[in-house]
């Protein structure tokens, strides 16, 4: 049997202290029970590592597919230093999952490359709701925390 572990555990002393930066946290409203828990984990982690609530711009979008466009808007209109995209895509009975998951991942990556700023993929892609809950504050930790840590490490460069 596979040992369950908290994938969000990290060495607090290894996280750089970032100052004078603005971060946008964009959260998909689809599967909000899951994404809201991820958002809380993300923002709490940013604040734990020195960000003030004034340094964090929160925005929501309908679904994960809209995350890349809003990330680009936040960079262009608000001149943020980084964007954390939070979403949850759960496998259904059709190929819709495959199209949305791939488009979202590619879109988020492309915005980061085009804008030359960290744009973090904090999107859970799960086979079922329980797998998503396990990764949104459940037995495997919180992907929102992981996204925040990834962002902080990239901002240190």
Image (cartoon, rainbow, N blue to C red):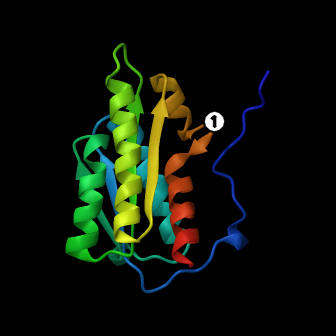
Position in image of residue 54 (x %, y %)? 33, 77
Identify which residue is drawn at 43% across, 54% down.
40
SS for tag 1?
loop
Q: How many discs mark residues in the rendered view?
A: 1
Query: Residue 92 location in percent, x, y?
Result: 37, 18
Name the outermost residue toward the top: 93
| Residue at 34%, 60% in the rendered image | 111
Residue nearest the observer in this picture, 154 or 60: 154
Q: Quadrant of residue 104?
A: top left
- Image point (51%, 25%), residue name: 130
Q: Is residue 153 above or below residue 28?
A: below
Can you say which quadrant of the picture contains the N terminus? top right
Please give left or right for residue 18 compared with residue 9 in the image.
left
Is residue 36 visible to us here? no
Residue found 37% across the figure and 56% down from its top = 110
The residue where tag 1 is placed is: 139
Name of the residue lying farthest toward the bottom? 20
Tell me if 32 is positioned left or right of 77 in this view: right
> Can you tell which quarter of the image residue 26 is in?
bottom left
Report whether residue 35 is seen. Answer: yes
**Is 99 left or right of 156, judged from the image as shown?**
left
| Residue 143 position in % (x across, y down) | 53, 47
Front in this rendered view, residue 118 or 133? 118
């Amino acid at each position: 049997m596979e040992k369950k572990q908290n994938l969000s555990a990290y060495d607090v002393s290894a996280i750089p202290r970032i100052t004078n930066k603005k971060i946008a946290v964009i959260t998909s409203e689809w599967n909000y029970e899951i994404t809201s828990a991820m958002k809380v984990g993300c923002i709490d982690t940013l604040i734990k590592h020195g960000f003030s609530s004034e340094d964090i711009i929160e925005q929501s979008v309908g679904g994960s597919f809209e995350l890349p466009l809003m990330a680009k808007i936040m960079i262009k209109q608000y001149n943020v230093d980084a964007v954390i995209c939070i979403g949850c895509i759960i496998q259904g009975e059709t190929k819709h999952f495959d199209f949305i998951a791939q488009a979202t991942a590619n879109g988020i990556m492309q915005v980061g490359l085009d804008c030359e700023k960290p744009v973090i993929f904090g999107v859970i892609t799960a086979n079922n709701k329980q797998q998503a809950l396990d990764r949104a504050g459940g037995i495997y930790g919180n992907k929102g925390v992981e996204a925040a840590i990834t962002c902080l490490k990239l901002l240190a460069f």
